[in-house]
Structure formats: structure tokens, C-alpha cells
Amino acid sequence: MARGSKCRVTIEGVRLRMNGRRHYYPDVMVSCEEPGDAYAMSASCLIAEVLSPTTSAVDRGEKRIAYMAMPSLRHLLLIDIEGQLIDHTWRADASDAWLFELGTPGGALHLQSPAIAEIPVDDVFADG
């Protein structure tokens, strides 16, 4: 559970159902829905994908488009380990336009829904 909320954080291995046929396994996902299945979800408010040379094109293309079509999604983080950058696409509500923020070393990302949180970019890239 995420501290101070009923939301559940999952790291790898939990399937996100996009529709009847398509699904993905995000690296990190936060869902505030009631868990019906411990290994599958159909709604997420935050998704984080760690980019690698072999997954970057799919994560930035196909997955990004599919994730941003989800009414429940508020934050999408694409984490570039090599460049130490975080591409943060977000919106306050499903009817709002998507906004973009680039997290760089020394900066912080500000997540405002469903809870208010600040994530120092350096903490994401800190070893151990």
C-alpha cells in the first residue's frame, strides 16, 4: 500500500489489462482500485517504465499511447537511466489536457493526484 492511502504499489509481474486482448506489465504501477486479482489490474493512476535500449521505442511509442488512453491514469513516468532524465506526463483529471515535465538531476517531480508527493530526481537514480 502507498503510505497514507488505500492505493497499492506493484513492481513488475502484475499485468495491466488494456482491453480484452492487450495487456502490459509496467515496471511500477499504482492502483487505487479494489484488487480483484492479485496479478492483474485494469486501472492505474501512475505507471513508471524504466527505459532500456531494447524497450525504449515500445515504451515511448505503443505503450505511451495505450497508457494515455486510460481514463484512470494521472501520471506516466518514463525513466531514462543512462541520461538520468525522467519524462513525466501528467494530468489532474481524466478530462484535462496532458502536461509534460522533464525531471533532471537536482530537480524534483511534483505529483498531485491522487495524493500530493514530491520525488527528488536524484533519489530515483541513487544507488542502493
Image (cartoon, helix red, strand yellow):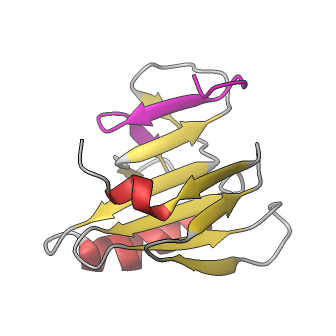
Residue 110 at x, y percent in the picture: 68, 61
Q: In this view, does 66 lie to the left or right of 117?
A: left
- Is residue 23 shown to the viewer in this render? yes
List the single residue furthest toward the front.
Answer: 106
In the image, 111 versus 107, the foreground residue is: 107
Image quadrant holding the N terminus, namely: top right
Q: In this view, does 57 lie to the left or right of 95?
A: left
- Is residue 22 shown to the viewer in this render? no
Q: Quadrant of residue 28?
A: top left
> Residue at point 24% right, 49% down?
127
Whether 125 is drawn above or below 45: the answer is: below
Residue 97 at x, y percent in the picture: 79, 78
List the single residue furthest toward the left.
Answer: 54
Q: Quadrant of residue 39?
A: top left
> Residue at point 60% right, 72% down?
89
Where does the magenta region start and end? 1-16
> Residue at point 24% right, 41% down?
128
Whether 78 is drawn above or below 10: the answer is: below
In the image, 17 versus 119, the foreground residue is: 119
- Residue 5 highlighted magenta (yes or no): yes
Residue 53 at x, y percent in the picture: 15, 75
- Main structural element of the magenta stretch: helix, strand or loop? loop
> Residue at point 31% right, 53% down?
126
Residue 68 at x, y percent in the picture: 59, 68
Q: In this view, does 48 lie to the left or right of 58?
A: right
Q: Is residue 70 left or right of residue 76?
A: right
Report the number of numbered marks: 0
